[in-house]
Amino acid sequence: MNEEMTPDYMTGTPNTVCADARRQFSRIGLMFLVGTALIYGVQFGASAIANAINPDLLSSTSYALLIVMIPMYVIAMPIMALLIKRIPAVTLPKKHMTFGQWLIAFLMCYGAMYVSNYTGLILTQLISILKGSPVTNTMLEVATSSNLWVNLFIMVLCAPVAEELIFRKLLIDRLAQYGEGVAVLFSGLMFGLFHGNLNQFVYAFVLGLCFGFIYVKTGNIRYTIGLHMLVNFLGSVLGVAILKWLGDDFLSIASDPAGMMSYMTGNFGKLIVYFIYIFLLLGVAIAGIILFIVNLKKIRFLPGMNTLPKGKRFSTTVLNVGMALYMIVWIVIIIVQLFQ
């Protein structure tokens, strides 16, 4: 059900607006929490069935990835989307984005992701030092050990479409009435938490903010799906393809001067290609950071038709049953992952 808010709702008193908003945020949080349970349920069920049929299937990273991710995208997330659609929403006005504007948006998104990714790496490194053992970057291990075609299918085709529809379109359409800033913030925060580990949370949160801003200003989910696909392709397919081309032992000897010198004698051409790729991405990131700084003053969030009063925004949006439970569950998952 995709309903427009009634005039009486839109012109309520501050207390009425806060009460209605608290119910709206709680319903959204609960639906996303149910979606989380569905995802874990179908993934556990698919793994159990695969293990019963042939235990060796799960020993292959590529097969294991397909076994747990396809049921998520085919069963759990569609049901999750249907549940979310039962919550009333508003329709955002659609605005056109030229290819040049889209390209600038990509550069800015990539620059923001580059900085936030290193911020996340620094945080996890500090935690590694404090706990005395490394924090496992599960997604990196999966991406580098699975088949490139599987990465392309799951991370470049399936993930961007499903995640943008749920965390941008369905979520923002139901929160935009409280102001663009609120909608974008929760789109980024809930998206970041959904990744379930600190390595990805920081940059997923920042990317979620960027994608959310683009969607709330254009009302067109195709733009953010395209950006999401391109970002994932550069990291999960092209980057992994180059690392595999360099050889399985490249990462292990990258910090060893003697080992690197030995590697260079027979792989100088490969290293040239690798460094060209690295410097190209660095150039893209620097260009994006500069564009972000230059355009920072242009970033404006319009108020919603049900703007929440100052002093009550946190208690209204977060301190409700559904949203609080969603956040607590995912924060616990992230903490557990840090200390595995």
Image (tube, grey):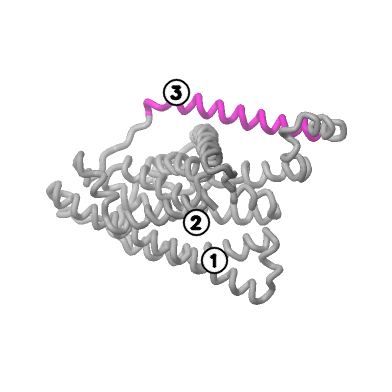
In the rendered image, which quarter is residue 121 located in?
A: top right
| Residue 276 on the magenta span | yes
What's the amino acid at mark 3? Val
In the rendered image, which quarter is residue 240 located in?
A: top right
Q: Do labels 1 and 3 touch, CB within 8 Å?
A: no
x, y (%) of residue 27? 30, 60
User: Could you tell whether 263 is left or right of 340 in the image?
Assistant: right
The residue sitting at 29% across, 37% down in the picture is 302
What's the amino acid at mark 2? Ala
Q: Is residue 282 above or below residue 193?
A: above
Q: Which secondary structure, mark 1?
A: helix
Q: Residue furthest left?
A: 13
The residue wearing badge 2 is 162
The residue sitting at 50% across, 68% down in the picture is 75
Q: Which of the marked residues, 2 or 1, is nearer the chain's N terminus? A: 1
x, y (%) of residue 117? 53, 37
Density class for disc 3 (Cα within 10 Å; few <14, some 14-19, many ≥20) is: few
Q: Is residue 211 above or below residue 75?
A: above
The residue sitting at 49% across, 68% down in the picture is 41
The residue wearing badge 3 is 294
Q: Which residues are magenta?
A: 270-298
Q: Which is nearer the eye, 213 or 200?
A: 200
